[in-house]
Image: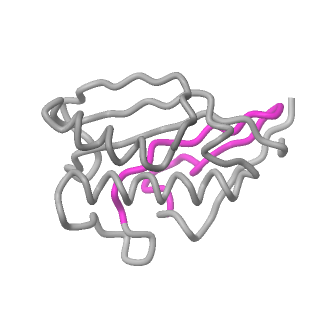
Amino acid sequence: MSSQIIQTDEAPAAIGPYAQAVSCNGFLFCSGQIGLDPASGQVVDGGVERQAEQVMSNLEAVLRAGGSSWGQVIKTTIYLASMDDFAAVNTVYAHYLGDHRPARATVAAAGLPKGVLVEIEAVAACAQG
């Protein structure tokens, strides 16, 4: 088994001892992304919809760096600070995925890093690793 750490400056640097993503045996395992602006490292303003947009943009950059795309995503997990935000996040998520429909779980989390409202992780097929 060979694996490769994936890192891009187009997404926020990891805020702990983990990689943005790891490619292994044709799969890309993307760590959870939160609504951090890659340039400032700060949580974006504007509520859950704006955070979800930044999360999806960050994940898109990691997918691209790993030789993948939204169309190759197999599974996502969405973590919400409140299930009241499900519909708003779902709308942003659907915009990025278009007609593609990966498997997905959505769970309420008691607390997310930096007090954000949403975090999303993904597993995708890729050509690397």
- Is residue 65 found left or right of 122 in the rendered image? right
Q: Relative to residue 37, is residue 110 depicted above or below?
A: above
- Is residue 127 found left or right of 43 in the rendered image? right
**72 drawn magenta:** no
Residue sitting at 32 percent across and 38 percent down?
Answer: 90
Residue sitting at 60 percent across and 55 percent down?
Answer: 62
The percent position of residue 34, horizontal first and vertical second, equals 36, 51
- The magenta segment: 13-36
State the residue in front, 48 or 97. Answer: 97
The percent position of residue 72, horizontal first and vertical second, equals 68, 38
Residue sitting at 71 percent across and 50 percent down?
Answer: 5
How many numbered markers are drawn?
0
The percent position of residue 39, horizontal first and vertical second, equals 43, 77
Placement of the C terminus among the 4 image quadrants: top right
- Is residue 10 found left or right of 69 in the rendered image? left
Residue sitting at 29 percent across and 47 percent down?
Answer: 113
